[in-house]
Amino acid sequence: MQHNILRDTEVTKIYLVYLDSNSVKRKESVKLRFMDNKECYFAGVMPVNFVKPKKKTSAELIVYTEDGVYKSNVVIKESNLSLRDIIYTVSIPQKWDFIQYRNSSRKKVQLPLVIKFKDDFIITAQTEDLSLGGISFFSNQNVSSIYKKISGILTLEFPQDLIINFPDSRLVVETKFVREKLNVENHYGEVLYVYKFLSLNSDEQMILKNFLMKLN
């Protein structure tokens, strides 16, 4: 996977949806116990009137995070019962579909940006798009895993000739990595990074909303 969603610290819920051996649809809450490069192992509470799924049962894995919902089609290779729970052995998700909790639609716009971290590591780029919830940008700059776990300070530069109420035409806000995507068409060799805003106040939201409404 391009970004290991299952090990994301912001995962709030994981569900496994499948038909059991009696063809009854089940949606079971599970937790990731272990994952290697071949299989995932999830633990779920033993439900009432539980019937094990057949081996190699098709299933849908649904992962809820603070930013949206990820879904992937997987296979339950087998399931094993213990005294307290059930362990599902599941194939590794190969492709995720993502539904974002957006505060507004994203608008294509190129604005210079800098993200600075406490140890003075800096990311410089231009926005690919912008919303009330955050930004995305392409970069060939290597961002190590540690900077995907901690927040930084984003400075977003707006055109000087634009009438906008940010001081010095700059939005300065705390931000944090959400996800990344490789091999985007026409951007080979670059990574699409998505970052969210963590601390926009009501005035900043209104100024940004007015700016977005003026874009085509």
Image (spheres, rainbow, N blue to C red):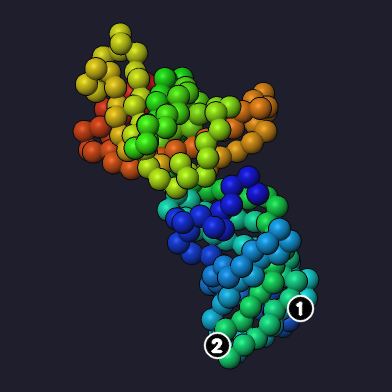
Whole-percent x and y of residue 168? 24, 17
Say few, some or many: other residues with alpha carbon within 10 Å of mark 1 (under 14 / 14 to 19 / 20 or more). some
Asked which secondary structure carries label 2, the reply is loop
* Residue displayed at 52% across by 44% down: 145
How far apart are the two marked residues, 2 and 1, measured between alpha carbons? Answer: 20 Å
Q: Which residue is mark 1?
A: 54
Callout 2 crowding tier (Cα within 10 Å): few <14, some 14–19, many ≥20? few
Q: Residue at x 37, y 42 (%)?
A: 151
Q: Residue 115 or 45: which is nearer the viewer?
A: 115
Q: Amino acid at mark 1?
A: Lys
Task: Please report the residue visible at 59 percent of the width from the left and 47 percent of the height from the top.
Answer: 3
* Horizontal and vertical percent position of residue 81: 65, 86
Q: Which mark is residue 15?
A: none
- Which is more toward the observer, 121 or 56? 121
Task: For the C terminus, give its image quadrant.
Answer: top left
Tell me where residue 92 sits by quadrant: bottom right
Earlier residue among tags 2 and 1: 1
Eyeballing the image, is 171 above or below 7? Answer: above
120 relative to 63, above or below: above
Say what secondary structure mark 1 lies in.
Answer: loop
Disc 2: which residue: 84
Q: Find residue 69 and report its horizontal and vertical position in percent.
A: 52, 54
Is residue 79 among the parts visible in the rendering?
yes
Residue at image location 42% in from the left, 32% down from the top: 121
Q: Quadrant of residue 190?
A: top right
